Image (spheres, grey):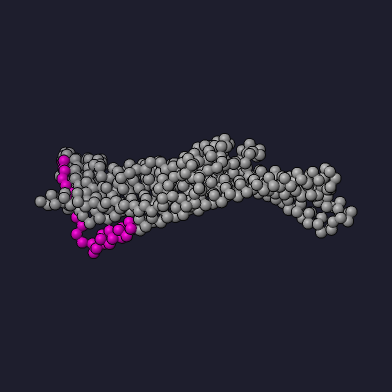
Amino acid sequence: MLACGLALGACATQTPLPTLPSETPAAWRGGSANDHAQPAPDLANWWRAFNDPVLDGLIDSALQENLGVAIAGLRLQAARRVEHRSRSEFWPNLNFRIYEETAPGATTGYFEMGFDSAWEFGFFGRARASMRIAMADLNLAIIDEAAARVSVCAEVAKDYVDLRAAQARLQVAEELVELRAHRFELLQVRVRTRLAAQAEADHAQAELEQARSEASEALAGTRQAGAVLAVLLGRTEPDSAWSVPGAQPVLPELGVAQAPADLVRTRPEIRRAEQNVLRAAGDLGIARADLWPKLGLVGSMISASALTGDIHANKAVPLIGPTVQLPLWDWGARRDVAAARESALAASLLAYRQAVLEGLAEVESALAGFSDKSFRDKNAATEIALGERAANAAGTLKRVGLGDGLDEAQAQLGVAEARLQQINARRERALAFIALYKAFGGVMPPLEAP
């Protein structure tokens, strides 16, 4: 009767997994009006939207050579080993021992050797709870490894965009230096002919010095971006090919067509919060199992030789039987632990909900930022077209003898400054695109399921 009662209690005592809350809107608020006409986002290869082979090669190299990704991969291997050990916790084990023992009264000393085995059944939900803890720890390592890859892809793309933007700014900055130097010379001629005040020439000279400073800053930006790229690729020195100016990455028209439930839940933060709920349920299961007896089987095959006292030959004694560890009284300590684990599980559910809400807010913000930067990129192209029209008109006036070239130089400066604004706008749009896909979280590999 006692055995039947324990068996029934062992089967009935389980800690069910709680249902995770799902609070996601039906559509993105920050999406554009033509999102329905766009293809679904490619979370696995989003950087290929730039259509830049150099960037594709850098990211492929970074995924193979980045030290952070390598570290996360090794930690994942370690977590898989530990998970296997945890699964074998409630399997039978076999041990071999050699030791000495003295009989009570110190009349005889024995030399003993043999095998012993123990098998804890993991009843009352203990085995399932232990499995959940091990599974959650393994999944957290899987998530961390995937998050490292997502972060590296985003950082490489960001630094590559910064590198190309700095190179483009450097070219325009050097052109601005030449244009401002030419304008300063023209104003000096006007000052000598008393057609302009000295203050105008002084102001033009100050603008020339400012242009030279901006050119120097752009040059430093190219070196800094190259150095950061080298670190991401696990190298000590930047590749000499990176110093050759290349085309600035330009994005086509893009939109987001899928619902948040299909995208946001791939975020590492949300997946970590999900696994924390699983682990908290496992901790609660262990605490509840501790309120009940631990049941199992033990066995041994020991050969004992008396070395002192009544010396006799080896005798192998086989033994097998049940083991019961029954907690009787601990002043409510185990119940306090169980109550604490219940509160921890409730807190993990709230943390999961908070992670979902924060993820939605970050993606919505990234969507709004990407739409805004796309609008500014279009405006920059319009400003360049207007500036070029003004420069052509000023050049025509100079050719027919109605100008000394100062108006044309000023118009050319306007075109160069508009080009500089377009470079910055394209960079900001590209960075907003990268931030958006980093907010999505990328593709999450399959996780272990309970």
Image-quadrant location for residue 78: top left
Q: Is residue 4 magenta?
A: no
Is 40 left, or right, of 240 in this rendering?
left
**Is residue 147 in sight in this rendering?**
no
Please state the horizontal and vertical placement of residue 233, each as a whole percent of the image.
55, 40
Q: Position of residue 438 (x, y in %)?
A: 49, 47
Residue in the picture at 22% in, 40% down: 114
Query: How far across and down, in percent of the image, does residue 410 sit?
Result: 76, 50
Give the magenta part as a residue range. 317-346
Residue that lies at the very extreme toward the right in this rendered image: 193
The residue lying at 22 percent from left, 46 percent from top is: 121
Number of numbered tags placed on the structure image: 0
Residue 340 falls left or right of residue 317 = right
Q: Could you tell me which quadrant the C terminus lies in?
A: top left
Residue 332: image location, x then y, percent: 24, 63
Q: Is residue 47 visible?
A: yes
- 330, 33: nearer the viewer: 33
Q: Going by the picture, which residue comes out furthest to the left? A: 1
The foreground one among 433 and 336 is 433
**Residue 325 is inside the magenta segment:** yes
Viewer-side residue, 289 vs 218: 218
Which residue corresponds to the image point at 35% horizontal and 53% vertical from the top-left?
21
The residue located at (24%, 53%) in the rendering is: 289
Furthest residue in direction bottom, as rendered: 331
Task: Say whether residue 387 is left or right of residue 136.
Answer: right
In the depicted view, which residue is nearer to us: 210 or 307?
A: 210
